[in-house]
Amino acid sequence: MRLSDLKKGQRGRIRSLDESVSKLRLLEMGCLPGEIVEMQNYAPMRDPLVIIVNGMIIAIRKENAEEIEIELL
Amino acid sequence: MNKLQVVLAGNPNCGKSSLFNALTGLKQKTSNVPGTTVEIRKGVFPLEDGREVHITDLPGSYSFHPGSDDEKVAADYLSNSSTDDLVIFIADASQLKRNLLFFSQIADAGRFMILAVNMIDVAETRGIETDITRLENELGIPVVAINARIGTGVEAIRKKIGENLFKVHYKFLQHSPGNKEDETVDRFTAIQVLMDKVQRRKPPLRILTVKIDGIVLHRYWGILIFLLVMFLVFQSVFFLAKWPMDLIEMLFSGLSQWAGSALPPNFLTGLIIGGLIPGLSGVLVFLPQIAILFFFITLLEDSGYMARITYLMDWPMRKFGLSGKSVLPLMSGAACAIPAILSARSIENKKEKLLTILVTPLMSCSARLPVYTILAALVVPDNASWGFFNLKGLLLMGMYLLGFVTSLLAALVISFFIKQRSKSTFVIELPVYRTPHLANLWHVCFNKSKSFVTGAGKIILIVSVVLWFLASHGYGNKWDKLNNTVVTDTAQHNAEILKASFAGEIGKFIEPAIEPLGFNWKIGIALVTSFAAREVFVGTMATIYGLENKDDYRSIKDKMASDTNPITGKPVYSVAVAFSLMIFYAFAMQCISTLAVVYKETGSIKLPLLQLTFMTALAWLSSWLVYVVLS
């Protein structure tokens, strides 16, 4: 399951990140394997998304959220 | 040694600027990093023992591996600074783990450091307890708890700067793995070990920010609130600026009258009263608007709402090839394109950044306002209204909208020609809402206004002098004959002289190119001079009409209004010409400083030239269309 598949209010645990140009930035922002993410909000067109990781609120484009593999909690 | 060099580093939104302001007070200045246009703030403050501390505030950065050009500046500055310099690292207590990534990279480079942990008190109310003493022991450097906003802990930092300097003895990474991604993961693993020793977290509470976001980022309410905020900002800019603008206008007309009576009637006085004073007042009068707009933009940034705008507008902006991050540059472009283009640095995606830089100058900047105002005054009566709305106000608002819509459409068109399909990264932090810091707002307003005044002032001074020379000198038989004849009709004669001068020659030279737009050679002169900067238009008109009628003390507007075409006998500034000219100024790239900034930021000479070409073509075609339709 991908981070972008989470519904509002659902939580998941990050399993892995795809190899891409965005990976480093995602890691630096605290999207590390093992961390718990919560889907907070969607923009009007369901893109970008707002997630909470490690107490930080992050806005992320759907295409970047699709690069994060998670397991639903 | 009585001078200490200190570098201030940290993540974005960690409270860095608050600490910088608290440490330096008013003694600070922004300066450019050599070779770039990136602004870095520097300040000086004394220690108790009399030594001077020179402190540099770096752009906020998440790590040593830059994602955007902003962050590259921070990383480069750190790598190139002397290893003897002290690095004060500021970390937000609520985000300590993530903040320590950048910290660990600087620490492993073997630098002298002090760690300032910001907002510990706020973190505690959220169930996050930090053991400062333990952190200090583990790291081996001074660790100070501060609240930069209200100034607690700032004295303690000042004291620590004067004491012995220490390097971090905690080793985050023994050896660096080959790639940056693995390095980041390994660093966070090491940081987690440290975190377990120094911080205890209770399960997170629903913080206030999340509750506010429930409304502010709501699918429908969010957009509505955004539009309302934009409307209020631009309304207030015009409303609040009115009073100081009237005051500035009064001061300048007083100055002009005083100069007219106090200075001897020679050519220098003519230059001062005819070109310099009207030129300067035409620009300075819009200073309040620039300052107030930047005040609001900084307010939106400081409060945390700007990041929300970026998020809300990302999808719609992407449809035009731009990014949510383009909103800030476009908004700033309504004041001045130069700082606006600089703020495009935070856009990581190359294509989106390039498009933003290319279209930002289409936004109606303050320099266009003097031009619009004088032209609108020529064709729209002062008190004319349409329903509840003042017609002139509506016209100006229309010009702003036109600039915004055109910049979006231009981005859309140009995006088809830029082939770059690398995947984009858009991951931004939505910071916790905060009460904006007044001192910071003041600094930003003051600095932006100052650079606008000095920049515009210099250009106007130079252009006025050059224009005055060109308009009062000429060559050839006709020029000599005109200047040696005794005449009865002075006004007519002066007009002939102006036409025969160098400036007149230039105007007549380009007249064929602008005749289809309804412009005569006098407007031609103004187009040429205001190529340096749009705001020069008013000063040029003042000089031209001042030379024609030397004893005429009416305002430039009245002089322009009474100018008639010698062949048809109709006013030169008809509705069609005034609108055509307004459209020309809306779209034409008449700002050398902007071209220079685009060149610096993109490192390419082709791009500013391309921008100049397409904007001039767009201006010519649209003006022509407007002129043909209206006349």
Image (cartoon, helix red, strand yellow):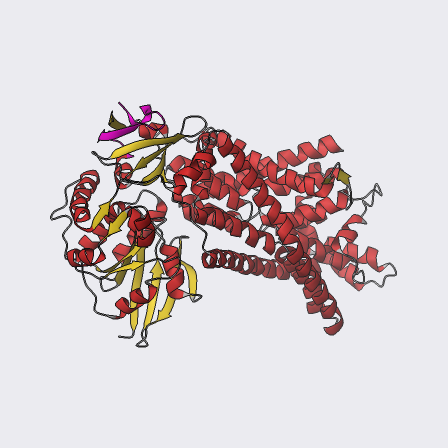
Position of the C terminus of chain B, as image quadrant, is top right
Residue range highlighted in magenta: A1-22
B33, B67: nearer the viewer? B67
Q: Residue furthest right?
A: B488
Which percent across, then down, holds residue B131?
A: 22, 54
Q: Looking at the rendering, which quadrant does residue A18 occupy?
A: top left
Position of B33 relative to B376 (above/below)? below
B559, B462: nearer the viewer? B559
Position of B269 relative to A35 (above/below)? below
B143, B489: nearer the viewer? B143
B142, B79: nearer the viewer? B142
Which percent across, then down, holds residue B373?
A: 69, 48
Rendered residue at 49%/58% (across/down): B442
Rendered residue at 31%/32% (across/down): A38
Does residue B631 appear to the left or right of B413 in the view shown? right
Is residue B610 among what the camera can see? no
Is residue A36 among what the camera can see? yes
Which percent across, then down, holds residue B374?
A: 71, 49
